[in-house]
Image (spheres, rainbow, N blue to C red):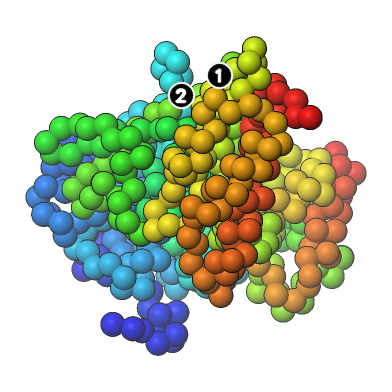
Amino acid sequence: MSTTKLSFKLNGHSMEVAIAPNTLLIDLLRDDLGLTGTKVGCREGECGACTVLLDGEPVNSCILPTIKVAGRSLTTIEGLANEEGELDEIQQAFMDEGAAQCGFCTPGMIMNAKALLNKNPNPDEAEIRQSLSGVLCRCTGYQKIVQAVVTASQMKKLQE
Amino acid sequence: MSLTFKELHWAKDIRVQQYLQPKTLEEALHILQDYRGRARVIAGGTDVIPQLRKRDIELEALVDITGLPDMANIEKDGDKIILGGLTTHAQVASSQLIKDQAGLLSEGAGSVGSPQIRNIATVAGNLISGQPAADTSIPLLALDASVTIASGEGERAVPLSEFFLDLGKTALDPCKEILTRIKFQPLGKDQGGAYLRLSKRKALSLPMLVCAVKVTVNKDKNTISEASIALGPVAPTPFRDRHTEDALKGAPINLTTLADAAEGASAYCSPRDSLLRGSCDYRQEMVKVFVKRGLVRALEQAGCTLD
């Protein structure tokens, strides 16, 4: 199958890739670019494990045709730590609060929380739960995940 | 052909040979004409992509219309509100104009799928998928919305009451036509609306029952001048209960009227027995509750008090 050239921003860096027109974003990320932090759960846009940020908004990468990211800015879980490898507040808070059990949904949870805190640094619990509502976790019962996002928002405030 | 779990889960390709991104409506319609039914329109793709992966549909090409200009806006045109064909659920759910003047649609749009789905999926796509309880179809049907459909032969307007033909089937052929606009009259003075949804969880769940109500009241006479009641899934398509609506015309605003309407609507609906979405009996009971509750909320929004 013929390939198309595509440029976009990935985790702050300009990228150019050649892809077949039927490639879904998750497969480009995991198979071609080796970014396996983003997980494949249901592959049908339900579970949210594959969430990435497209121009800052959370989307399910498992059902997104890769061509749609042309000219846009994409952030994956690998893009959250800074150049020195220092973790994002949300990642740190997930560790501190013990918010992961099997860890499979964690990238999806963190990316949705990231989109929320970027827009609203001071969310209440209802807003946090709403922002995480598109990711299924089958282990934790969600309490510690919600708590981790609360903690992350407080950490952010302390730094500022 | 049924696929095993392993085949389905790891099959990565969506088996299309071309992914086309026209820049104008004319170009998009030309492409569809050239492919004669072997290409299909895709916008958000949150329904189309899973269908392609499951091999429910087979196509040669996808025609991505998200690059078409001026189709992703929410606008006021005279006394009507117009949603462009590419307007997403997230846009509608967060629009102050929709919240203020068509709250029932705002709530419906905010209930679809998940935040990630709402960021991508279009309201037009929600209509075109033709599901009987689609969260924006039901309130738009109650609002008497109409859609504009463009094809190689020109444009036509279709009222939503004539748009839904059968389960998964609408008046629009996505291999030929493009939905360019959704138009409806916002709620005005002496009008109120309500949206109610029954589901197993608060998020990421298909509805067991959706009900949308719009009322117009005559405050001098303390009567209901007009009511629309839309329900799903109680029939193969989103359903307008004209029978109960007729009975409500001119009826006095009191609890007896609401109780009669609830009984009437329930008798007129035939939800399927479903292990996932509840039994027919249960959902008929819930139709009563929702129609009554919906009317109460809509009447309150219209500024009426119930004794």
The residue to which callout 1 is attached is B188
**Which amino acid type is shown beneath numbered disc 2?**
Gln
Decide: marks 1, 2 in contact (CB < 8 A)?
yes
Locate residue A86: give its quadrant.
bottom right
Please tell me which residue lies in front, B59 or B273: B273
Please, which chain is the residue tagged with disc 1 on? B
Q: Residues within 10 Å of mark 2 (few under 14, many from 20)?
A: some
Q: Residue at x 37, y 62 (%)?
A: B49
Q: Residue at x 40, y 80 (%)?
A: B8
The residue to which callout 2 is attached is B185
Label 2's element?
Answer: loop
| Separation of marks 1 and 2 at Cα, in angstroms | 8 Å
**Which amino acid type is shown beneath numbered disc 1?**
Gly
Locate residue B122: give its quadrant.
top left
Label 1's element?
Answer: loop
Instruction: Tell me the quarter of the image containing the C terminus of chain B.
Output: top right
Left or right, B97 with respect to B70, comes to right
Marks 1 and 2 share the same chain: yes
Residue A34 horizontal/vertical position (percent): 50, 71
Q: Residue at x 70, y 21 (%)?
A: B303
Residue B259 horizontal/vertical position (percent): 66, 43
Please tell me which residue lies in front, A7 or B90: B90
Residue B121 horizontal/vertical position (percent): 46, 49
